[in-house]
Image (tube, coloured by chain):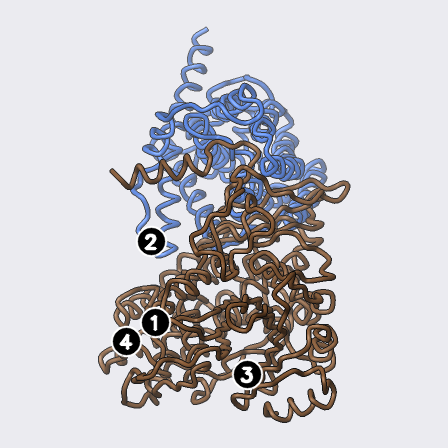
């Protein structure tokens, strides 16, 4: 019984931590971007104020299906935060035995589906074009993460989520070839998972005017923005856990600090890539993802032969 | 070839069709032809002599000659010759044979002439309203002389909506505009889209007409108009300012002092510098590369400061009056300007180096928005769009004005005909502009800034002026008149032609490429939309009426 309470508490703590840190990461991202662009940039805490401001605005019902729109906003943030419960944030994953890796894949896909719902609810041409792009991206992108998790599962010989997350993609084998391949694949597609330039195609402000989000304002927009910021932290955490676990096993403050340092290094990487690239077109992006998918299948085959 | 030789050719070929001709100088030719022969003569000039179509002007000349007047302007760029084909039309039911089938570039100008002057182009295939607002009654033509400049016609219906064409089968409509993040001014493209592919579009623009030409012809004076002219455009205002003044000077046979010509050249080139830097920034923003957007704006800023030091304004320099300029370039400013140019040159070299190596930008711009030589010729495309397609035209060299005949520079061309080539052309033109300004500062002679004009300007003379704006040739046509103001002043900004090429450029491309293709002509809608009252937003959901909005706006001001 106590273990259940502890895992619930751990999950809540994780959610709190993600909610607390995500806007800060966004603030750092914006500040560094500004510096790269010879600008002053907003204060580090600006994203917190932005969210508060949006949350305090009038809640406008608009678009074709306001109920669905509201649902999409709630569900989007909720699914991201549920993922936060399952992912270790410097400690072991809090929800022990909460399920297998397929659950994680489902939850991550659910986030994307919420964006689709949001676009459908808005019902404008731009949001429809946006969701068609989002859908194409999801179809080619989500399998990459799924394969990464399966590669880890194959190495460990278990589909249990906490076991896979504890053992990373490499399990206890040092650096297997399949793991290295997946590391490369994830590094190259990371920008797309966190929806930043050059892969922010479905929202492309200058083409689609924020696409699926175009009908959102006020509190509901805040929820979406919050979910997007949280995604950056969660995907970073997943990446660190699965692909860069080195040093996380050290005793409490050092291992924990190392984990967060790695996360912020990832945020930095995302920032620099976003600031130095132009946006890809959807067909160019899909071709790129398809290439990565080919590589990750090779990794999967290698993994199943134990390499 | 001088004008006389060309005229001899015309005379041999057309003989009695020519009513009258006027050859004021070696590089201008005004031929009055019979209305029945206009198509035949235009065909010869455009096809056989390979002239470039410039503009069509309709004018109500009834109070003076008793006729309507249509002018088709053509340019012989290699021969450094501008030619105006003038056609007098009877005062009742004026009609003229349309030349738009043979010269597609004339399509808009003929539609505009029909809207505003009421001259019917017979045989035009697509006679839809172009310029007038949706609610304007038929048969009321604001540029006719018997219409007051502030007249609102009876029967104006602010609620009437524009009838858009039916999209082709299997296509959905994506409205691009009237307001869109990448359009800095209102314009409406209705894109016909199949999946992600654009199959066609319909354009409805002219939403910010300010009645500038009518205002000039009815209430302003020769030296007020330059200040009005530069308000045509927020980016290349000085171009219109200079072009108008030059047209008047040409009509009146005035020559400004040399120092004034150098000052004009310097200011025009400074304008090109800041315009090109702005464009490269915007193009990068459109493809999502905001870092270069910010950097080019930072590099551009000192140019704006220099303009402010010279003229008192970052933009809208209020530079010219008829016969001269109003600002001097002092020795101190010369020194400072040279410093700014040096810094700009080194920073821009770094940027161009970075961009030309960047595979990522090339991926988004190569083979996109192609406007090949054929399209350039048929649509009369101008400036960097034409030069990027290998068409070697540049008014600064072909029809020299100000001090351009006294400086050396290269006309930059490229062969790709796509957005990437336009980026390269504009990037390299920045260096040429720097070169021109340096030479001007070197060669500028002392002397007066303005001509002393004692007599009234002669009446009824025609002046043409082509000025190479950052976006292409800006063409001004002036007929001088009584009361110290022109009878007719027509502005043809480069975007007016380039915009007509856009539907062909975006056809069968992805929506994602639409914005950068449109952006690559550096569109300037306010230049294109010069005339008449405000258009009403015609959306499916109408929240405010025009009157309500106006009342609201005035309430705010009154407080």
**Quadrant of the drawing holding the N terminus of chain B:** bottom right
State the hue of chain B.
Answer: brown
Q: CA distance from mark 2 to mark 1?
A: 42 Å
**Label 2: few (<14), some (14–19) or many (≥20) C-alpha neighbours in 10 Å:** some
Give the alpha-carbon distance from disc 3 to disc 2, as whole Å: 42 Å
Which mark is in front, 4 or 1?
1
Residue B272, given in percent of the width and then of the height, sits at 43, 71
Q: Is residue A191 above or below residue B244?
A: above
Q: Which mark is residue A39?
A: 2
Residue at mark 1 to residue at mark 3: CA–CA distance: 28 Å
Marks 4/1 same chain: yes
Q: Position of residue A61 (x, y in %)?
A: 48, 23
Quarter location, residue A67: top right
Which of the numbered marks, if any, corresponds to residue B327? 4
Q: Secondary structure at mark 4?
A: loop
Disc 1: CA contacts within 10 A as few (<14), some (14-19) or many (>=20): some
Residue B317, percent from left and from top = 33, 68
Same chain for marks 4 and 3?
yes
**Contact (Cβ within 8 Å) of mark 3 with mark 2:** no
In front of the other: label 2 or label 1? 1
Pair 4/2: label in front = 4
CB contact under 8 Å: marks 2 and 1: no
Q: Is residue B19 above or below residue A241?
A: below
Residue hosting label 3: B398
Q: Circle 3 sits in a helix, a strand or a loop, which is it?
A: helix
Residue B520 vs residue B219, the one in the foreground? B219
Q: Give the residue at mark 1.
A: B223
Label 2, secondary structure: give it: loop
Which mark is in front, 1 or 3? 1
- Judging by colour alone, the chain drawn in blue in this rendered image is A
Q: Please, which chain is the residue tagged with disc 1 on?
A: B
Same chain check for tags 2 and 1: no
């Amino acid at each position: 019984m106590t273990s259940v309470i502890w895992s619930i508490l751990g999950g809540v703590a994780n959610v709190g931590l993600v909610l607390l840190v995500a806007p800060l990461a966004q603030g750092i991202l914006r500040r560094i971007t500004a510096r790269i662009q010879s600008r002053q940039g907003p204060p580090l805490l600006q994203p917190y104020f932005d969210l508060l401001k949006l949350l305090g605005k009038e809640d406008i019902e608009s678009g074709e299906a306001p109920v669905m729109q509201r649902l999409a906003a709630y569900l989007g943030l909720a699914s991201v935060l549920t993922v936060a419960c399952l992912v270790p944030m410097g400690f072991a994953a809090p929800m022990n035995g909460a399920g297998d890796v397929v659950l994680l894949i489902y939850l991550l896909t659910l986030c994307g589906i919420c964006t689709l719902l949001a676009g459908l609810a808005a019902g404008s041409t731009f949001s429809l074009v946006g969701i068609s792009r989002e859908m194409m991206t999801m179809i080619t992108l989500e399998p990459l993460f799924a394969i990464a998790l399966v590669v880890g599962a194959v190495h460990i010989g278990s589909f249990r989520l906490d076991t896979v997350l504890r053992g990373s993609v490499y399990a206890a084998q040092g650096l297997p070839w399949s793991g290295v391949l997946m590391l490369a694949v994830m590094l190259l597609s990371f920008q797309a998972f966190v929806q930043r330039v050059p892969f922010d195609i479905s929202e492309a402000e200058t083409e689609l005017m924020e696409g699926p989000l175009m009908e959102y304002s006020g509190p509901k927009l805040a929820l979406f923005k919050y979910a997007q910021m949280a995604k950056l932290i969660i995907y970073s955490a997943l990446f660190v856990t699965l692909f860069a676990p080195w040093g996380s096993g050290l005793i409490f403050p050092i291992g924990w600090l190392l984990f967060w340092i790695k996360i912020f290094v990832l945020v930095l990487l995302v920032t620099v890539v976003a600031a130095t690239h132009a946006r890809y077109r959807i067909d160019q992006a899909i071709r790129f993802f398809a290439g990565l998918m080919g590589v990750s299948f090779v990794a999967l085959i290698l993994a199943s032969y134990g390499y | 070839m001088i004008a006389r030789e060309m005229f001899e050719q015309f005379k041999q070929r057309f003989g009695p069709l020519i009513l009258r001709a006027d050859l004021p100088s070696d590089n201008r030719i005004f031929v009055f032809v019979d209305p029945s022969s206009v198509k035949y003569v235009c065909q010869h000039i455009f096809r056989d002599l390979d002239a470039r179509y410039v503009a069509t002007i309709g004018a109500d000349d009834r109070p003076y000659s008793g006729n309507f007047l249509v002018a088709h302007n053509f340019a012989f760029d290699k021969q450094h010759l501008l030619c105006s084909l003038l056609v007098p039309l009877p005062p009742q039911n004026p009609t003229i044979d349309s030349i738009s089938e043979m010269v597609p570039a004339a399509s808009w100008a003929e539609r505009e002439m029909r809207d505003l002057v009421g001259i019917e182009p017979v045989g035009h295939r697509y006679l839809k309203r172009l310029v007038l607002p949706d609610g304007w009654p038929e048969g009321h033509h604001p540029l006719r002389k018997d219409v007051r400049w502030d007249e609102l016609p009876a029967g104006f219906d602010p609620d009437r909506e524009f009838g858009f064409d039916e999209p082709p089968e299997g296509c959905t409509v994506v409205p691009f505009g009237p307001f869109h993040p990448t359009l800095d001014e209102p314009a409406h493209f209705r894109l016909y889209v199949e999946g992600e592919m654009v199959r066609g579009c319909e354009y409805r623009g002219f939403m910010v007409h300010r009645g500038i030409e009518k205002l000039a012809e009815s209430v302003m004076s020769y030296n007020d108009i330059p200040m009005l002219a530069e308000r045509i455009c927020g980016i290349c205002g000085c171009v219109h300012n200079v072009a108008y003044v030059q047209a008047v000077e040409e009509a009146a046979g005035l020559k400004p002092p040399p120092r004034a010509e150098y000052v004009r050249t310097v200011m025009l080139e400074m304008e090109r510098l800041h315009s090109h830097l702005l464009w490269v920034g915007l193009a990068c923003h459109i493809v999502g590369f905001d870092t270069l957007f910010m950097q080019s704006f930072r590099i551009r800023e000192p140019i704006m400061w220099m303009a402010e030091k010279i003229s008192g304004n970052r933009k809208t320099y209020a530079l010219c009056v008829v016969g001269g300029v109003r600002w001097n370039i002092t020795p101190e400013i010369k020194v400072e300007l040279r410093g700014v140019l040096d810094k700009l040159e080194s920073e821009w070299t770094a940027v161009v180096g970075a961009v030309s190596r960047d595979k990522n930008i090339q991926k988004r711009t190569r083979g996109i928005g192609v406007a090949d030589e054929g399209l350039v010729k048929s649509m009369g495309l101008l400036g960097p769009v034409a030069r990027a397609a290998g068409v070697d035209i540049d008014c600064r060299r072909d029809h020299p004005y100000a001090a351009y005949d006294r400086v050396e520079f290269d006309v930059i061309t490229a062969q790709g005909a796509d957005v990437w080539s336009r980026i390269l052309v504009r990037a390299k033109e920045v260096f040429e502009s720097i070169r021109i300004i340096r030479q001007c500062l070197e060669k500028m002679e002392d002397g007066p800034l303005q001509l002393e004009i004692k007599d009234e300007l002669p009446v009824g003379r025609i002046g043409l002026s082509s000025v190479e704006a950052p976006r292409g040739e800006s063409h001004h046509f002036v007929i001088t008149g009584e009361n110290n103001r022109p009878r007719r002043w027509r502005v043809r900004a480069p975007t007016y032609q380039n915009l007509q090429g856009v539907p062909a450029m975006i056809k069968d491309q992805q929506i994602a490429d639409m914005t950068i293709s449109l952006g690559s002509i550096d569109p300037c809608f306010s230049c294109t939309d010069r005339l008449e009252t405000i258009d009403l937003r015609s959306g499916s959901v109408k929240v405010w009426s025009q009157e309500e909005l106006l009342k609201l706006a005035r309430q705010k001001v009154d407080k």
